Image (cartoon, helix red, strand yellow):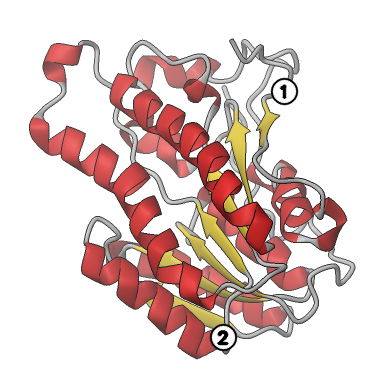
Amino acid sequence: MTPRPDHGEQSYVGSGRLAGRKALVTGGDSGIGRAAAIAYAREGADVAIGYLPAEEEDARAVIDLIRAAGRKAVPVPGDIRSEAFCRKMVSDAVAGLGGLDILVNNAGYQQARDSILDITTEQLDATFKTNVYALVWIIQAALPHLRPGATIINTASINAYDPGEDIIDYAATKAAIASLTKSLSKQLTPKGIRVNAIAPGPYWTPLQVSGGQKPEKLPKFGADSLTGRPGQQAEIAPLYVLLASSESSFTSGDIFGSTGGKPQG
């Protein structure tokens, strides 16, 4: 059976690399977003997290951990499938943090289906609005607040290169995110704003057990990586920290895999 998620509360100890920075992380209540938000706080950043209102309990746990690290925490509940909420989320984050230096577009929607015939228009809308439309809307709202030295980090996926046969709509959105990251970098890097993406392989997150994978696949999820297991959330947090820090100042338009050795297509 696959191991339980490591949320990152215990294993990540920061060294102040993001001191004084202000970050907005979407999908910050759980999974990879949760681990990144906690790591950012432990590295000295103040953090706003976007999340669905139904995830309030999980979000509150993250808010408590950010504050326990001695940093300002700003909760922003709402549905990023709404363009109006995307604008409000950025506005509330900027107001609560006093600015914005780091934008992490991490929230995602994934539902496995056996056949393309099973993908409804409702699901297609939910997948593309959550994973692609919202990313564009949030970046549009954030750009007026980003100054030279700021960074945008998008969460893509190994599915952008090696798409799964039962998550074809999700895989298509992740390919779009990879392409958008590269083209947006060409626009923004000359202005001093770096844009990169992280493309995780099989990471064990709530996304997988809430319909992202077929139930029969869960016991062997990640077993085809060279490590023989899925990644744990805390294991990818340092990559989000690196791309948010000045240590990666020459890095833009790049997509970083974290796949446990699983080939990227």
Which callout, 1 or 2, points at the residue further toward the start of the chain?
Answer: 2
Q: Position of residue 128 (x, y in %)?
A: 27, 39
Quarter in which the N terminus is drawn: top right
Quarter in which the C terminus is drawn: top right
Q: Position of residue 94 (x, y in %)?
A: 49, 82
Reading the image, the residue beneath label 1 is 260
Closest to the observer, 253 or 130: 253
- Residue 80 in which image quadrant: bottom left
Give, as a three-letter code, the residue at label 2: Leu
Q: Classify mark 2: helix, strand or loop.
A: helix
- Residue 50 in which image quadrant: bottom left
Give residue 4's mark.
none
- State the residue at coordinates (80%, 77%): 19
- State the residue at coordinates (62%, 10%): 224
Residue depth check, mark 1 versus mark 2: number of the one nearer the observer: 2
Q: Is residue 260 above or below residue 179?
A: above
Lateral position of residue 262 relative to residue 55, left or right: right
Reading the image, the residue beneath label 2 is 97
- State the residue at coordinates (45%, 64%): 58
CA gap, disc 1 and disc 2? 35 Å
Give, as a three-letter code, the residue at label 1: Gly
Q: Position of residue 147 (x, y in %)?
A: 63, 74
Q: Classify mark 1: helix, strand or loop.
A: loop
- Residue 125 in which image quadrant: top left
